[in-house]
């Protein structure tokens, strides 16, 4: 038996700063990194030191830092942890690339199967995108997920986004 580990994550989107009476060619585009800024649901997850509060602080580094992390309990059964995400500093261009990046692994590569499901949500219940990683391994994987146009258009409130991790030992 082994827990699943999540090392860090970040959502990137092109942020368009605009002003009235400015042509489209004059708009400046910057990549904005949105990272965890609060625990929304902790469940049975904890930090690398065993803490069960402020888990977001263990995975909010930019750039990634694997010296701290969060982990599920041993032998997880649809165990969920969910985080709120920083709000963008301005209007987000829905035509821009939106990417979700996160790093994960399990402690015992040869141990029991652990599946990891990652969901980008608006609010606590509306799923925008879901990614499933079956039988995760013992080496750190950095996932970079690009949202489809349909997934981006499903986002109606960038100030209410959350990222959820669900570990399960089937």
Image (spheres, helix red, strand yellow):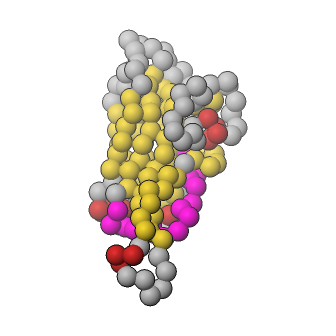
Residue sitting at x 70%, y 38%:
53
Q: Decide whether residue 84 is among the magenta residues.
A: yes
Q: Which residues are magenta?
A: 81-96
Q: Is residue 63 above or below residue 120?
A: above
Residue sitting at x 37%, y 25%:
136
Q: Is residue 27 above or below residue 50?
A: below
Looking at the magenta stretch, what is its main secondary structure?
loop
**Residue 167, image x and y in percent?**
46, 32
Quadrant for the C terminus, please: top left
Instruction: Decide if residue 81 is in sight here.
Output: no
Q: Is residue 33 left or right of residue 115?
A: right
Q: Quadrant of residue 54?
A: top right
**Residue 104, image x and y in percent?**
44, 30
Q: Is residue 164 left or right of residue 60?
A: left
Residue sitting at x 32%, y 66%:
95
Using the image as rendered, state which of residue 104 and residue 35 is in the foreground. 35
């Amino acid at each position: 038996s082994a827990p699943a580990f999540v090392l860090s994550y970040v959502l990137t989107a092109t942020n368009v700063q605009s002003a009235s009476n400015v042509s489209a060619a004059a708009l400046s585009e910057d990549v904005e990194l949105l990272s965890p800024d609060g625990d929304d649901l902790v469940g049975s997850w904890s930090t690398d030191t065993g803490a069960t509060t402020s888990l977001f602080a263990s995975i909010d580094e930019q750039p990634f830092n694997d010296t701290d992390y969060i982990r599920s309990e041993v032998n997880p059964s649809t165990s969920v942890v969910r985080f709120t995400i920083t709000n963008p500093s301005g209007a987000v261009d829905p035509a821009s690339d939106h990417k979700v990046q996160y790093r994960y692994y399990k402690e015992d590569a040869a141990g029991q199967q652990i599946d990891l499901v990652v969901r980008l949500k608006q609010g606590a219940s509306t799923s925008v995108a879901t990614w499933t990683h079956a039988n995760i391994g013992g080496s750190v994987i950095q996932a970079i997920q690009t949202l489809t146009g349909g997934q981006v258009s499903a986002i109606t409130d960038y100030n209410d986004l959350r990222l959820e991790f669900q570990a399960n030992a089937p």
